[in-house]
Amino acid sequence: MLPYIHLINRDVPVYGLLMAAGGVLGWLLSLYRAQRHTPELPRESVTRFYVIFVIGALVGAKVYSLVLVWPSLTANISQLWTDPQLFLQMYVYGGMVFYGGLIGGALCVAGLLLSRRVTFPQLETVYLPVVPLVHGIGRIGCFCAGCCYGVPTDSVLGVVYPAGGLAPAGIPLVPIQLFEAAGDFVLCALLCLPFYRQPGRRLAVYLLGYGCLRFATECFRGDAARGLAGPLSGAQWISIVCMAAGVALTLGLCLRAWTRRRPQAG
């Protein structure tokens, strides 16, 4: 709806501005949670780890997106000279695939854990609630840019995009980006609750919660470049894996808690 705003004699993509704002808010939330829940973790380390996660997520998200749109990118490479603004909007400014970013961030987590500079409970407590917060703000950016748009609808909730953007013009579309953003913010609030005393519970809630959210929202996506694999999109298959991992982790945590209490009961 608002792909660009005019700042200092330049057209600045709103998507990029919102992603930057999300990154700053995510950093502030991680600092707050570290100070409140893991005071033994130095402030400098919190910031350094956060920067590592952001770089890994951005690289993973962009690489995944380029893999999905590679045939289209190579076919439209001439637009880089004939219509560079549209080309950059389609393939550079936008085009961040969340699951690619999640994979990139997970690889960074694995590297930090192997380096023994931080523990899993510290990472889970400080950084996991940041993920849906930043993602939700990014989805609002998607709505403004017109990417990741929904299917056509006759509902009063339908949003009509103007011509010249990424979304089809003149057709009421489901604002699925905003629905997913709302779900992400709810998930962030759930992960911030102080009920997760056992390491792994927050991760289980996130895997189950976001897996269900993404699987459902994918049913209302109208953009074609999503990596369809059989009857489901690539994101839906990954969502199934996330949900299965969340269920397995939950069962494992319950079994572990039961085995620890059993000798005491006997």
Image (spheres, rainbow, N blue to C red):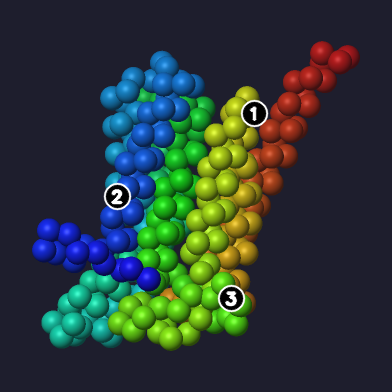
- Labelled disc at residue 195: 1
Q: Is residue 53 above or below residue 126?
A: below
Is the residue marked by circle 2 packed among few (<14), some (14-19), or many (20+) residues within 10 Å? Answer: some
Q: Position of residue 61 (x, y in %)?
A: 37, 58
Residue lying furthest front: 156
Seen at 55% across and 61% down, the residue is 179
Quarter of the image where one finds residue 66:
bottom left
Task: Say what secondary structure mark 2 lies in.
Answer: helix
Q: Which of marks 3 and 1 is in front?
A: 3
Q: Which residue bears the numbered disc 3?
A: 156
Q: Where is residue 6 in the image (x, y as percent from the top left)?
A: 19, 64
Q: What quarter of the picture does the C terminus occupy?
A: top right
Seen at 53% across and 67% down, the residue is 176
Question: Is residue 214 among the parts visible in the rendering?
Answer: yes
122 and 28: which is toward the camera: 28
Seen at 17% across and 59% down, the residue is 7
At label 2, the amino acid type is Ala
Quarter of the image where one finds residue 52:
top left
Q: Are marks 2 and 3 in contact (CB under 8 Å)?
A: no
Q: Which residue bears the numbered disc 2?
A: 20
Is the residue marked by circle 3 packed among few (<14), some (14-19), or many (20+) residues within 10 Å? Answer: few
